Amino acid sequence: MLSATTLRSSCRSVGALLLPRSTPTLTTPTLATPTAPLTQPSLPLLRTPVRTLSDAVNDFQTTHAAKDVLIRKGGVAEIDTAYPDVEKLEKFGQYVASILPKYIQDVRMTSTKELEILIHPEGVVPVLGMLRDHTNAQFKALMEITAVDMPSREYRFELVYCLLSHRYNARCVVKTYTDELTPVDSVTALFKSADWGEREVWDMYGVFFSGHPDLRRILTDYGFEGHPQRKDFPLSGYTEVRYDNELCRVVYEPVEVAQEFRKFELDTPWELFPNYRETPEHLLEAAKDTQPEEAK
């Protein structure tokens, strides 16, 4: 067997035989021939200063000196008085009411300078679709869906849709109404965020959304009866949960409220609750001592 040094020497000799004696040198074109030798002088090490988050905030504030920026340099955030433009929102509300008079019943400005549109229940999809796709609106973000229960009204539930336009930095609130039996069209085809919002309203208030792909409870447990956010729902609920040692699982039972919990005297709660508790002796002695003084 050949050693490593023998192999290296043999390869070098073979390579010398294969290469020609005079090989042409290739020169690359340059813009100017250097007069000095191509040697790089030794440069000192440059240490870049460590930048913090405050430096980035200062750069943002100095480079973006627009009037619509709400954050000002100086500690406390200041809100520009020109934001939002109430006149433009009012004109846009009047424009929306003029092009959709069939569904829009009223347009007004709230105390928080937000546009509020009251519509008929059948106009949920057309109105929200127009507000999303219109060039001058572009309310493409549905922030939340909620409801308000007012049992004194004929249509006790008031549905509230909160919209946001990133393009124009404006907010819009769309309100409609319904009752326990009348369904409302789902807007999940327009806004993906409406999926869980409509499920929450169905779970808490019992408002049914027709066309929802998966309308089921989202906050309460399986088999829960009733809708907790309704005004006629008792605060204690209808069922209570406890762990059964014999069954080795959690069981549901009807709520049993003792009479002591129904009547609670705030003046002397520890003496009268529960009724069978004996009064301590020091309280009896103190009561005897105060009686002669009150008689005088």
Image (cartoon, helix red, strand yellow):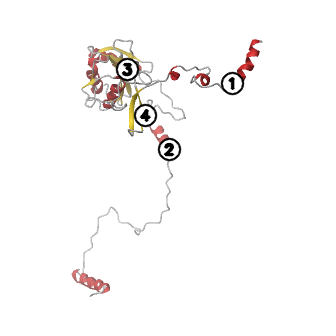
Q: Quadrant of residue 8?
A: bottom left
Spot occupied by residue 256 in the image (x, y as percentages of width and height): 44, 25
Along the polypeptide, which appears first: circle 1 or circle 2?
Answer: 2
Residue with the mark numbered 1:
283
Along the polypeptide, which appears first: circle 1 or circle 3?
Answer: 3
The three-letter code of the residue at mark 2 reads Asp
The three-letter code of the residue at mark 3 reads Leu
The quarter in which the N terminus is drawn is bottom left
Residue with the mark numbered 3:
89
The three-letter code of the residue at mark 1 reads Leu
Residue with the mark numbered 2:
55
Q: Is residue 29 above or below residue 241?
A: below
- Using the numbered discs, state the Cα–Cα distance from disc 3 to disc 2 in whole angstroms: 36 Å
Along the polypeptide, which appears first: circle 4 or circle 3?
Answer: 3
Q: Of circles 2 and 4, which is in front?
A: 4
Q: Of circles 1 and 2, which is in front?
A: 1
Along the polypeptide, which appears first: circle 2 or circle 4?
Answer: 2
Residue with the mark numbered 4:
242
Q: Is residue 152 above or below residue 114?
A: above
Residues 171 and 90: in front is: 171
Q: Quadrant of residue 146?
A: top left
Residue at (35, 66) in percent of width and height? 33
Spot occupied by residue 122 in the image (x, y as percentages of width and height): 26, 18
